[in-house]
Image (cartoon, grey):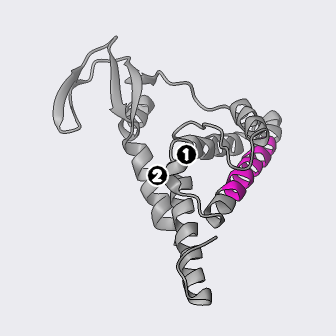
Amino acid sequence: MIKPFAELSAAYHLLTPVRVAVLKSLGKVKVEGRWEAFEKGDEASLPLWLSEELRKLGYVDPREQELTDSDVGKYLMVEKGLKSNEFASLRERFYLEARELLKELREGAPKRSEDVLRAIKLEGNLSDLQRIRTRKIVQIAFLGGKVEEFADKLLPEERALFTLIREMLSEWSAEVLGSGELG
């Protein structure tokens, strides 16, 4: 049930623009339906998927700071300090970037023992952060909150979860109590 929403969120993130520095001239590239020339030294805004492919080939360098394991720890501390109806502002592509960071650390772990410890700590912090935010989402959905009230603080994946939980609770209530409303 959630898989299509997760896939849609991943596609959304891959299409979002990121700032890059052009390291080698690219000539003309079709971006968002129009042809643009990118020369060495330019700064450009490209979809994430394209910037990643060009980065691997050495043509561009991302201008946005990458998510680090210490960033995740900071987000966790902030989230723990907030009320049950408040959410910390996370990076728009937080879950996508966190998944990639964890994958990188796990792949490096057999070579470097410090990566094993970093991966374990990161996995724990991500699990705790996700659990706290999920608990808040479930509680707000149960109490009849509207996704619009929290849309600016919830990530696309979380908005999908909130909507699904809200719909399930309404359907359940309609079946069990004969009404579609909660609370």
Residue 2 shows in the view = no
Q: Amino acid at mark 2?
A: Ala
Q: Amino acid at mark 1?
A: Leu
Q: Residue furthest top?
A: 41
Q: Does 127 appear in magenta?
A: yes
User: Residue 134 versus residue 43: which sits nearer the camera?
Assistant: 134
Number of other residues with Cα within 10 Å of mark 1, as a class: few under 14, some 14 to 19, many 20 or more: some
Q: Does 134 appear in magenta?
A: yes
User: Residue 103 versus residue 58: which sits nearer the camera?
Assistant: 103
> If the image is split into quadrants, where does the C terminus sit?
bottom right
Q: Image point 61% across, 87% down: which residue? A: 177
Residue 63, given in percent of the width and then of the height, sits at 47, 21
Q: Image point 78% across, 42% down: which residue? A: 80
Residue range highlighted in magenta: 120-136
Asked if marks 2 and 1 touch (Cβ < 8 Å), the reply is: yes
Label located before the other in sequence (2 or 1): 2
Residue 159, given in percent of the width and then of the height, sits at 52, 55
Circle 2 — which element? helix
151 left or right of 83 in image = left
Residue bearing the label numbered 1: 96
Circle 1 — which element? helix
Q: Residue furthest left?
A: 34
Q: Image point 74% across, 51% down: which residue? A: 132
Residue 92, given in percent of the width and then of the height, sits at 52, 39
Give residue 174's quadrant in the image: bottom right
User: Residue 72 versus residue 171: which sits nearer the camera?
Assistant: 171
Residue bearing the label numbered 2: 10
Residue 99 shows in the view = yes
Q: Image point 53% across, 49% down: which residue? A: 149
Give residue 102's quadrant in the image: top right
